[in-house]
Image: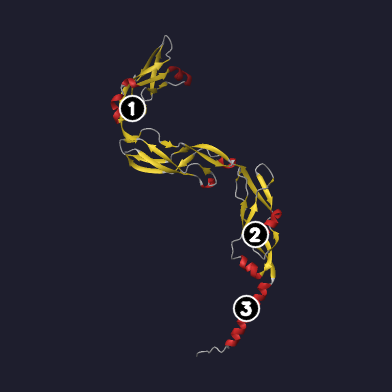
Amino acid sequence: MKIKNNIPKAFLVFLLTSFSIWILINLSKKSTVFLSYDINYKGLAQNKILQEEPIDEIDILVEGTGFKLFLANFFSKEIELSVEKLNKKSTNNYYILVNNQIRNIQKQIKSGLLLKEIKQDTIYLKLGSLQTKKIPVLPNLEIEYKSGYDIVEKPLIKPDSVTISGTELQLKNINSIRLERLVLQDVSNDINKKLPIVLPEKLNKVKICHSSVEISIKVNKFTEKEFEIPVHVKNIPKGSKLNIFPKKVKVFFKLQLEDFDKITKDSFEVYCDFNEAVKNKHPYLILKLKSKSDYILTSRIVPNKVDFLIHK
């Protein structure tokens, strides 16, 4: 069974009109409420910098009609606070008394609203003097070279150091800075890249003079070669005869293929010091290798120690 709606249209119009009048009456009444305003700090001295972020909102008790309070929520609410004149609490700790800036704040809040009270009377600021520091730039490499290829010398970075600016607290523990990670595989040619500098998120307030640097890595074909080299013993006691086993050891070394014929047995010296064995009470002699050529990149001795017998 269908129920007919018998509510007269005149009644609905009366109800709507009454409700509208009620809203208008209430919106015209004055009331007080707390409104939150974003803070914009102005006038900080050029040689000062915030070491920590201060509060970014302030609660203000305002009085106004319902219309004004309602409209205030549809507009950006921001208050500029002057930090030109600060009160000092300790070395890096300062504060401002917000009530000293009531006139300035009243001018900034929406017309028709009366400032009655500021909830946060005191705002603390941690400041430091702006300083600079020069730190080295470090590569962050993960490179796999093609078989038979390798890096010739340490990576060349230009510039190899950068200047950063910030507070003493911010710069205190920064002793180096890294580049963005470079990952390459099967490399057989020279590498030349422009890489961004990575600044940790916690240091996002630190300013840096360069955002990126150039890195160059020389790559070449390498080979390994070996020689059998006699061992020389230093500081044998006078009147004593020393026998070592073995008398010769193998020296393995790595060099660029183009320099293969530039190295001879005379490019190496293998020696040990008898005094060190006596001092450390070792029953063996530890071998040391001296390379006499800049063409040799890496080298090792096999074995790296020899046994000995001494006859007096």
**Residue 92 coordinates in the image, percent (x, y):** 65, 43
Under circle 1, the secondary element is strand
User: Which class describes the residues within 10 Å of circle 3: few (<14), some (14-19), or many (20+)?
Assistant: few
* Image position of 202 with respect to 176: above or below: below
Considering only order in the chain, which callout, 2 or 3, is on the residue closer to the N terminus? Answer: 3
Q: Amino acid at mark 1?
A: Phe
Q: CA distance from mark 3 to mark 2?
A: 32 Å
Under circle 2, the secondary element is helix
Considering only order in the chain, which callout, 1 or 3, is on the residue closer to the N terminus? Answer: 3
Residue at position x 69%, y 68% in the image: 31
**For this rendering, which residue is in front, 45 or 308?**
45
Nearer the observer: mark 3 or 1; the answer is: 3
Q: Amino acid at mark 2?
A: Gln
Judge left or right: residue 115 versus residue 234: right
Residue 255 is drawn in which quadrant?
A: top left
Q: Residue furthest top?
A: 239
Judge left or right: residue 131 versus residue 214: right
Q: Amino acid at mark 3?
A: Ser
* Image position of 139 with respect to 242: above or below: below
- Residue 20 is tagged as 3
- Residue 252 is tagged as 1
